[in-house]
Amino acid sequence: MATGNGSLVTEFILVGLTDQPELQTPLFFLFLTMYVITVLGNLGLITLIGLNSHLHTPMYFFLFNLSFIDFCYSSVFTPKMLMNFVLKENIISYMGCMTQLYFYLFFVISECYVLTSMAYDRYVAICNPLLYNTAMSPKLCGNFMLGSYLMAFGGATAHTGCMLRLTFCDANTINHYFCDLLPLLQLSCTSTYINEMVVFIVVGINIIVPSLAIFISYSLIISSILQISSTVGWSKAFSTCSSHMIAVSLFFGSGAFVYLKPSSDESVNKGKISSVFYTNVVPMMNPLIYSLRNKDVKVVLRKILSRRKDPDLGTFSYSFLLDLTMKELVVKNASSVTEFILLGLTDQRELQMPLFFLFLVNYVLALVGNLILISMICLNSHLHTPMYFFLFNLSLIDYCYSFVCTPKLLMGFFSERNIISYMGCMTQLFFFCFFVNSDSECYVLMSMAYDRYVAICNPLLYNIAMSPKVCCNVMLSSYLMAFSGTVAIMGCMLRLTFCDANTINHYFCDVLPLFQLSCISTYVNELVLFIVVTVNISAPSVTICISYGFILSSILKIKSSQGRSKAFRTCSSHIIVVSLFFGSGAFTYLKPSSGGSIAEEKISSVFFTTVIPLMNPLIYSLRNKDVKDALRKILSKRKC
């Protein structure tokens, strides 16, 4: 596929960490082991924090987000790194490279500010324990995380936007194991002065500002610790701080070493080694340093393994730092509610077990199916086309938002009381809105419909109309629209007051059930919700309808009945999925909220939270000849 911008390069070759053959196999198993430990450790930590209400505190709220970020960004580049150890030539498409660069930057910048928030949380807990509940309220914690992701979005967009303006002529060999900034700048055949200035400014801000905040916080913490008379407490506090500071030093130190210096061949080679620290070592250390050595987490893990459903709050052992701060989190915003109870999908006991296994199987199939599809598209260069680029993003979105709702749904089938904290509820609502409600998936489906329209109705203009730059801009716009809509909905939700009622008539924290619990007017919220959802359903729906109108018109002109039949089958499958997704969304949200409509909403929600993610790999990929051919080639180990 030819690119539509000034670049002549359509794909890049990743050199990898080393070119010494005798090191390839040992390094493969080393980094594979590290990756497995990273994924299992962070997923385990996320699950423990989500399952136990005792860990629903500001400290563990930030740790939950840190683990989520580490889990995501370790998956951005490690698969490609591992491929390089076993393949003769590790190829990545232009679009794939820009996408990898964007998500890598997003998650790395996010981690900078989450680590800063954690340092500030510890500062308040140790230096101002009496003001802790006021200073670290759920609303403030939520704002910290929104600010972190907003800074990450701005930085990643600035870097990627400047990278897309560069021209790549003949050189396409990246001297790295993933698409990083400096190696890409060395390949450009146009001036990179603006890019290097943006790198220096953005990276400088995102390293210096958090570093200073962390340094000041820990200086005050150490000052307070030195005033503790107990030798045992003194030793424990210093051990905790030193562990955190080691991880922070590795992360920020390696990042500063890579980026805050002029680019050169020698610096890129050194950068590959230092990059290993913040791309592989730090995500693996996160669960080890912050959780698996933590007494609270080990106590919770023992209780879960011993199946203690109702732990005694009086016998729960808090760590040293939590003893300095609080015995229990009290929310100091306008709401008196600190946690919610999720009623679940149904209260009929005879249906609990069958529904649990039904949705568990559905959940596993959705995760495995989308992971297989993502892997197939990454592994095979023949699938590096606009159609599969959008499909990759669609599968990534489906994979991510399956995690948002389904675990709590499954817990509701066997828990007597399915409790979620205020902060946990707001976090779940944020990611649900981002992936579904606001809406990333709407615009990806719209992009796929437009891609098919250009391919069928204007095949001669396809390479120009669907250039890598256009595809990347379309995806950036999709995520920007989703983020904007989510911020609008969440901003209005955080202004609501919840008094005594805390029972949510749903299996996850959705917008309409939360409206019914508010003890103040929700008129503004309902108006914002109606506008946001209407825009994010109507605009894509109209575009999809117009695209398919032209597609059907072109298909009817095909003389071959066999070709016409194949085209109609492809279109009908896509239309079914689009109809289910947009139909269930419109039925749920484009109507006034009422007590009777919530029961219907729970049923319709099942479609776009559990059924759609399962159908994606089945309809778009596993029945697709290209994907099946790629799977056969990988399984038969045909490298050439």
Image (cartoon, rainbow, N blue to C red):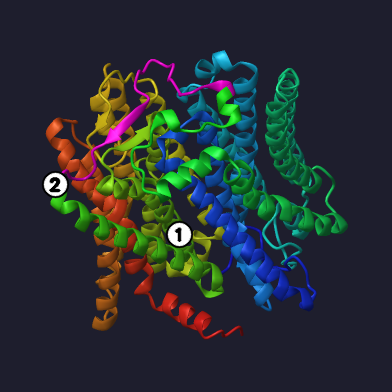
Work out whether residue 500 or residue 584 is closer to the camera in this orientation and state it: 500
Residue 225: x and y in percent read 72, 22
| Amino acid residing under circle 1 | Phe
Q: Is residue 131 above or below residue 372?
A: above
Work out whether residue 51 or residue 191 is closer to the camera in this orientation and state it: 51
| Amino acid residing under circle 2 | Gln
User: From the viewer's perspective, is 348 left or right of 194?
Assistant: left
Residue 284: x and y in percent read 63, 52
Q: Earlier in the sequence, mark 2 or mark 1?
A: 2
Residue 226: x and y in percent read 76, 21
Work out whether residue 357 or residue 303 is closer to the camera in this orientation and state it: 303
* Residue beneath disc 2: 348
Q: Quadrant of residue 619?
A: bottom left
Q: Residue at x 72, y 56 (%)?
A: 276
Q: Residue at x 65, y 38 (%)?
A: 112
Please state the extent of the stretch shown in magenta in the rendering.
324-347
* The disc label shown at residue 600, or none: none
Work out whether residue 454 or residue 281 is closer to the camera in this orientation and state it: 281
Mark 1 lies on a secondary structure that is helix
Q: CA distance from mark 2 to mark 1?
A: 41 Å
Foreground mark, 2 or 1? 2
Q: Which secondary structure dominates the residues rendered in magenta?
A: loop
* The disc label shown at residue 390, or none: 1
Q: Residue furthest right?
A: 266
- Using the rendered image of the protein, determine whether residue 124 is visible from the camera's viewpoint: yes
Quarter that holds the N terminus:
bottom right
